[in-house]
Image (cartoon, coloured by chain):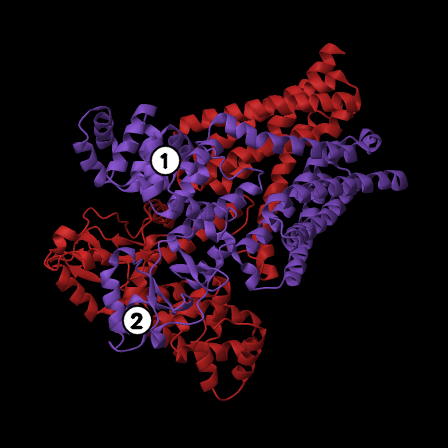
Chain colours: A purple, B red
Amino acid sequence: MRLNPSNISIIKRLLSGKNSRPLKAILKKCEPADIAGLFNLLHQKESINLIEAIISTDQAAEVLLEVPEQRLGVLLERMEMNKIIALLTYYPEDSCSYFLSVMNEQQRETVINLLPAERRQRLLQLLSYPEDTAGRVMSTSLFTLPITLNASQAIEYLREKPKDFPFYYAYCVDEVGKLVGVVSLREMATAPAQTPLMDLAKKDVVNVSPTTTNEEVAQLVEKYNFLAIPVLDDDQKILGVITIDDVVDIIQEQATADIYASAGLQEDDRVYSPILFSIKNRLPWMLLNLVLASYVSRVVSLFEATMQELIVLATLNNIVAGMGGNTAIQTLTVVTRGLSVGDFNYTSKTRAVLKEAAVGSFNGVVVGLCAGILVYFWKSNLMVAIVICLALILNSFFASALGTIVPLTMKYFKRDPAAGSGVIVTVLCDCLGFFAFLGIATFALHHFS
Amino acid sequence: MRLNPSNISIIKRLLSGKNSRPLKAILKKCEPADIAGLFNLLHQKESINLIEAIISTDQAAEVLLEVPEQRLGVLLERMEMNKIIALLTYYPEDSCSYFLSVMNEQQRETVINLLPAERRQRLLQLLSYPEDTAGRVMSTSLFTLPITLNASQAIEYLREKPKDFPFYYAYCVDEVGKLVGVVSLREMATAPAQTPLMDLAKKDVVNVSPTTTNEEVAQLVEKYNFLAIPVLDDDQKILGVITIDDVVDIIQEQATADIYASAGLQEDDRVYSPILFSIKNRLPWMLLNLVLASYVSRVVSLFEATMQELIVLATLNNIVAGMGGNTAIQTLTVVTRGLSVGDFNYTSKTRAVLKEAAVGSFNGVVVGLCAGILVYFWKSNLMVAIVICLALILNSFFASALGTIVPLTMKYFKRDPAAGSGVIVTVLCDCLGFFAFLGIATFALHHFS
């Protein structure tokens, strides 16, 4: 059942009523993501009632996984302790470790200490993997087949445990639990009954370790069109598996992070975030930019005498800054996106640097000439026209070189190329651009007029 | 087998040799994506030999699907006509329509006319759907079950046709072929043998039409964690199915398009694209920006007298432009990303506009005050300090309001909010910012000094 204004209002009415049976009947027919969207429309009391209802219909984990992280933290804070303990004791480990990770520290500590010892240990183990790594994302409810079975035995085995079978592949392990190969259901079903799994399974399975970054996991799954990828420990034993629906979420988050990084935003700063949260996240970036802009101003300030002599230079400054900035951002965007989606599988870094410099220089010459002509006809000043042409050519060359070299260098030193490159490149380009434009102008004023 | 420098050099040697058997043996063990990466390292002649080899090992479609679009066009141009015809006659329809779409127009026309009539018609039908819609992405090799079967009959049915079964869900249809429901393999396997599919299947299946945009498809699949979504015609008959690995590609492309749009780049302008291609793609944007920057210069030009009287204003112009631009880009990024990943499911548009204006204004006040203090201590001019403070506050308010309203308006008129908003917002902010800064300064100069 899809939710619409009319059944949403029915749900709201049922949430404030005493009789929970019709409510549960409706919720059972809804998609978890739709129920998660409901929280946005509910008051505090109604939210709590809804959580109790989805716990009783056994949908709580799936629904809560769809609630945006920030909202989830708030919802969990409001839940009764015994409900949280029940959730964390009976739901899948990977969902539980996620729930713990979005709680505030105090609630997390309290909750963890109230969990059964074994569960607590497992969850602490999962939480010990760094954020944004395979260990945090993997699902630990595993299904493995002994490699010693044959095809028909394997299918019997599957039939007995259909609940844990993820439908994609079955991972085959040897007697000590090491991963030996992977076999798809299709292969098992179509092979002659007596075929040993050993012959059927694909060996040399592409795998990751629990500390592999999410970005790498996503690139592997995407490149090979896998539906799942196993996470192995140092002894080649399976710890968990990452399925493609997790990868979809990783890719979306990664893309958001890339887009956001270039604007100095934090990934969880969204249209629905609280005002104070957004202010706190964005203000430091604005202040950093103010400081950097004031350094650029110092460069401009060196040429106050020149500008006073020829005020048209002050009028044209923004063209120089704008053109340099645009060239830099174009190059930077192509390079950082290429790094994050793996485009460098198809070209070398040196070739990319040379190519971008060539493109930037060529465009710089064209744009420089056009700007020169435009300025000449507007201000009737040949010298200024020549100066802006030269400045734009120089600036465009630097902008495209910096736009490639800075992110590649950051990647080399294992820093996030999307995050810092923009600021560095823009400030350097502004400084170089103004220095070139006003510097050449000063030289020309003293020597040719 | 994973490719590494040593086996790559073996493959290269085999490609130039006469004996194709060892080459085929190696290729059969490689992942299609790895073979696709090889083309980057090969000369023209070797590329053609590799294509012939993968045709003979029946891997051609999978490998070619992994080659970046631009490269694929070039490879197809070099292939012999009879090989292309064979490819397009025997490989899955959806792959073939994709191959046709990347060919140059002349080759496409020639090839289409040489195909068997029925195939030609089917492919033309697929190509008739608009680019970036479900009809272009869907896989048309379908597997459906008659809804009249029971669970054990359905499993028998599956066993007979394991090749077409996609492993995810089976779509159940009535006697005229209308989609009635969907059932997962798990449900079929665990239900009592006699349970009718009618009772087992989930009705009211979320579906799309062939003209649904890829973006919408991706949002649905992501929201509901589906592994596949059916594409229905107006009579509710299944035309095809879009699987999650296609959605992963859609999401990556969408993210690239979003990131690129804000820098005025075309999606296929990548680090490995030919130089001329990149020049041709980026130059128009640079020239557009030159024209717009010259309009901004005209605004600055209005205040030449004021700047000449107080040259420090010319020095500080770049702070005003920079701060306004950064505020605008932060707001714009949050809003456009929110539109493309569906964040507006969790808040209303009005609330978002008000929130962003509030955040922008608050940050504007803080940044304005800081800039005022900074300028006062640097230039010891109280009036200029007050002017820049006021200008930044005003500009920040406008920047955050425009950064929300412009993309929402573009979305309302069904334009791509990521593509045009950046330019419009930046130019408007620059003009408003300079006008506020230099205008207030002119007023102050005339009235207070």
Is A205 on the left or on the right of A401, as rendered? left
Q: Which chain carries label 1?
A: B
Question: What amino acid is labelled 1 in the image?
Answer: Asn
Quadrant of the snapshot with the C terminus of chain A: top right
Nearest the viewer among B405 and B244 is B244
The image shows residue B146 at horizontal and vertical percentages of 14, 60
Image quadrant in which you'd find residue B375 = top right
- Badge nearest the viewer, 1 or 2: 2
Nearest the viewer among A234 and B173 is A234
Quadrant of the snapshot with the N terminus of chain A: top left
In the picture of the structure, the residue carrying the numbered disc 2 is A187
The image shows residue A132 at horizontal and vertical percentages of 50, 48
What residue occupies the far front of the structure in this picture?
A117
In the picture of the structure, the residue carrying the numbered disc 1 is B345
Q: Which residue shows up at 65% across the image and 51% down it?
A: A410
Q: Mark 2 lies on which chain?
A: A
What residue occupies the far bottom of the structure in this picture?
B18
Question: What amino acid is labelled 2 in the image?
Answer: Glu
Is A353 on the left or on the right of B135, as rendered? right
Judge whether A142 appears above or below A186 on screen: above
- Secondary structure under badge 1? helix
Is A276 on the left or on the right of B225, as rendered? right
Q: Which residue shows up at 40% across the image and 51% down it?
A: A246
